[in-house]
């Protein structure tokens, strides 16, 4: 299973990755999978077991996540 956060702007994806890593959460920027969007874009993958911590961190740091996704496989 993969957990992804998607963003409307690249700068939010970069901020998300940087803030997560500072908090010890293994996040990495990846292309948005075709199953989520046909357009080009960036997403950040993070450990699914850290979902609650990631969402709380985004709220505190003002990171504008468009959507959170859980993808099987």
Image (cartoon, grey):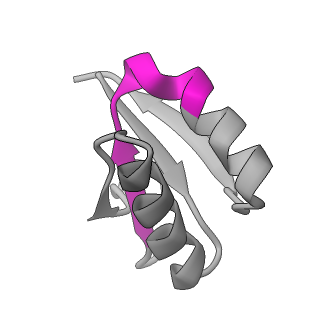
Residue displayed at 41% across by 61% down = 17
In this picture, residue 26 sits left or right of residue 71: left
**Depth check: 38 or 51 in front?**
51
The answer to which quarter of the image holds residue 46 is top left
In this picture, residue 62 sits left or right of residue 33: right
Q: Position of residue 33 (x, y in %)?
A: 33, 55
**Depth check: 42 or 54 in front?**
54
**Depth check: 60 or 39 in front?**
60
Relative to 52, does residue 23 appear above or below in the rendering?
below
Question: How many numbered discs?
Answer: 0
Residue 19 shown in magenta = no
- Which segment is the magenta one? 42-53
Q: Position of residue 50 (x, y in %)?
A: 45, 24
Residue displayed at 67% across by 56% down = 65
**Depth check: 44 or 60 in front?**
60
Residue displayed at 72% across by 57% down = 61
Relative to 66, does residue 49 appear above or below in the rendering?
above
Q: Position of residue 34 (x, y in %)?
A: 35, 58
Relative to 14, does residue 60 appear above or below in the rendering?
above
In the rendered view of the protein, which quadrant contains the C terminus? top left
The answer to which quarter of the image holds residue 40 is bottom left
Q: Residue furthest top?
A: 49
Q: Position of residue 71 (x, y in %)?
A: 38, 29
Residue displayed at 33% across by 30% down = 47
């Amino acid at each position: 299973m993969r957990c992804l956060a998607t963003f409307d702007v690249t700068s939010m994806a970069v901020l998300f990755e940087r803030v997560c890593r500072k908090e010890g959460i293994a996040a990495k920027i990846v292309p948005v999978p075709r199953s989520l969007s046909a357009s080009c874009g960036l997403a950040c993958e993070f450990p699914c077991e850290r979902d609650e911590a990631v969402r709380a961190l985004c709220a505190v740091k003002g990171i504008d996540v468009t959507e959170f996704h859980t993808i099987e496989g």
